[in-house]
Structures are given as structure tokens and as C-alpha cells.
């Protein structure tokens, strides 16, 4: 996987959310770098944990912000966040029996989700804020 940098075309028009999205891209790139460098399992686990924690706090902030702005598609947006969390929980459980394959699946899913969600779903609310 190649690194992808956040850029102004991904701006949703809110400085706090934009900074959070920048951080997600930074964490994603750190994860890819760890994989590319064949970092040990502890470094990968630490990076994954940081992404998951940050994602949870970002979702909470973003959902509250969109609620305050009366975003009409908030429930659909929340559902995307819920589906992400559900998928991550499922993949994490798989890791117990098939660590290497599951780790790659988890990294790939996280990586693609961050790019796709910020470049599509999150931009949908830009005109409402």
C-alpha cells in the first residue's frame, strides 16, 4: 500500500474536523510504514490501537458536531461509523486464530476506509456546516 497525504480537497470546512482527518491520514501512513519496514508486532499493535482510539473519539466529536448542525443525513453517517466499528471488532476476533492473514486484512480495511470515508462520506456534509 502506498502512503496518501491529506490535502485541501478533503477539507470539510471545519478546522477541528480537518485536523482530525489529517491525523487519521498520518496514523494510516504510520501503519503502512510499520508494515513496509516489517516492524515488530508490538509496534504494529501500538499503531493499530492508536488508530482505533483516535477513530472512536473522532466519531464522537463528528457525530455531535453534525447533530448540532442538524445534518439531515446524520443517521446514515452514524450507521457508517457503526458498521466500521462492527467490522473492526469482527476482524480483531479473527486475529486470535489467524494472526498474519487477519493483521493484513485489518490494515487493508483500515487504510482503505480512512481514505474512502474522508473523501466521500465526510465531504457530503460539507455544504451543511
Image (spheres, helix red, strand yellow):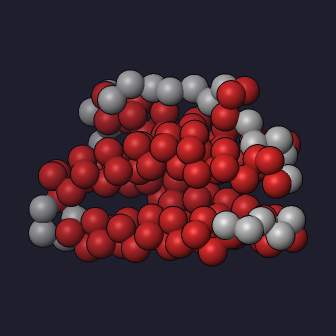
- In the image, residue 101 sits, relative to residue 94, either above or below, namely above
Q: Which residue is drawn at 67% across and 34% down?
A: 10
- 33 relative to 62 in the view: left or right: left
Could you tell me how many numbered marks the image carries? 0
In-front residue for pair 79/22: 79
Q: Position of residue 89 (x, y in %)?
A: 36, 72
- 32 relative to 20 in the view: left or right: left
- In the image, residue 125 sits, relative to residue 8, either above or below, namely below
Q: Which residue is drawn at 53% across and 49% down?
A: 117
In-front residue for pair 30/129: 129
In-front residue for pair 9/113: 9
- In the image, residue 71 sits, relative to residue 24, either above or below, namely below
Q: Position of residue 31 (x, y in %)?
A: 43, 40
Q: Position of residue 81 (x, y in %)?
A: 54, 66
Q: Residue at x 12, y 62 (%)?
A: 98
Asked if residue 42 can be seen in this view, the reply is no
Image quadrant in which you'd find residue 11? top right
- In the image, residue 34 sits, relative to residue 108, either above or below, namely above
Q: Residue at x 53, y 72 (%)?
A: 79
In-front residue for pair 77/87: 77
Image quadrant in which you'd find residue 56? bottom right
Asked if residue 108 can be seen in this view, the reply is yes
- 77 relative to 88 in the view: left or right: right
Q: Where is residue 128 in the image (x, y as percent from the top left)?
A: 82, 54
Q: Quadrant of the N terminus?
A: top left
Amino acid at each position: 500500500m502506498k502512503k496518501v497525504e491529506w490535502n485541501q480537497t478533503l477539507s470539510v470546512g471545519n478546522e477541528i474536523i480537518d485536523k482530525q482527518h489529517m491525523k487519521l491520514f498520518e496514523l494510516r501512513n504510520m501503519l503502512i510504514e510499520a508494515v513496509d519496514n516489517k516492524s515488530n508486532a508490538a509496534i504494529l499493535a501500538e499503531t493499530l490501537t492508536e488508530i482505533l482510539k483516535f477513530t472512536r473519539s473522532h466519531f464522537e466529536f463528528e457525530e455531535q458536531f453534525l447533530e448540532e448542525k442538524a445534518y439531515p443525513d446524520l443517521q446514515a453517517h452514524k450507521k457508517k461509523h457503526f458498521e466500521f466499528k462492527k467490522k473492526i471488532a469482527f476482524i480483531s476476533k479473527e486475529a486470535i486464530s489467524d494472526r498474519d492473514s487477519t493483521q493484513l486484512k485489518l490494515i487493508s480495511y483500515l487504510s482503505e476506509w480512512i481514505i474512502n470515508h474522508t473523501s466521500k462520506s465526510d465531504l457530503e456534509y460539507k455544504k451543511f456546516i
